[in-house]
């Protein structure tokens, strides 16, 4: 989904894996969906997995865990930006 990666979006792609990215792409393919719905839905799923669905208060995370979660969320944000903000010259 992302055409041009930086360090963090590439790391997010690695942490997400092909299955999650394919799921976001599938969400985008439904005719009733608007551009960017796949990455935003994936972002919501990540937030649920790591915060909303965790029983009780979350404990302190090691830096590597924070980097993993934030890289996943960052990937979603970059994919959403690319889906919803067409660059000049790339207009359909």
Image: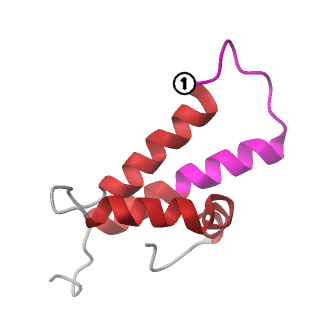
Left or right side of 1 for 56: right
User: In the image as oriented, which residue stretches furthest toward the bottom?
Assistant: 89
Q: Residue 19 is drawn in which quadrant?
A: bottom right
Left or right side of 79 for 50: right
Left or right side of 48 for 84: left
Q: Is residue 20 above or below residue 10?
A: above
Name the residue that disc number 1 marks: 52
**Is residue 15 shown in magenta?**
no
Alpha-carbon neighbours of circle 1 within 10 Å: few (<14), some, or many (≥20)?
Answer: some
Q: Nearer the viewer, residue 16 or 67?
A: 16
Residue 82 percent coordinates (x, y): 35, 68
Q: Residue 25 is drawn in which quadrant?
A: bottom left
Residue 18 percent coordinates (x, y): 58, 68
Colouring convention used in this rendered image of the protein: secondary structure
User: Residue at position x 36%, y 64% from top?
Assistant: 26
User: In the image as oriented, which residue stretches furthest toward the top?
Assistant: 56
Q: Is residue 43 above or below residue 86?
A: above
Q: How many marks?
A: 1
Q: Is residue 33 above or below residue 47?
A: below
Quarter of the image that includes the N terminus: bottom left
User: Residue at position x 47%, y 67% from top?
Assistant: 22
**Is residue 53 shown in magenta?**
yes
Secondary structure of residue under mark 1: helix
Quarter of the image that includes the C terminus: bottom left
Magenta stretch? 52-74
User: Residue at position x 63%, y 33% from top?
Assistant: 50
Residue 43 percent coordinates (x, y): 47, 46
Q: Nearer the viewer, residue 66 or 18?
A: 18
User: Residue at position x 27%, y 77% from top?
Assistant: 87
Q: Is residue 8 above or below residue 50?
A: below
Residue 16 percent coordinates (x, y): 62, 59
């Amino acid at each position: 989904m992302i055409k041009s990666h930086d360090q963090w979006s590439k790391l997010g792609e690695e942490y997400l894996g092909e299955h999650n990215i394919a799921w976001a792409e599938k969400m985008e393919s439904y005719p009733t969906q608007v551009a960017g719905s796949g990455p935003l839905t994936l972002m919501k799923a990540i937030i649920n997995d790591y915060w909303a669905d965790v029983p009780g208060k979350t404990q302190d995370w090691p830096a590597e865990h924070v980097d993993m979660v934030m890289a996943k969320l960052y990937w979603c944000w970059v994919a959403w930006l690319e889906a919803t903000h067409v660059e000049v010259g790339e207009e359909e």
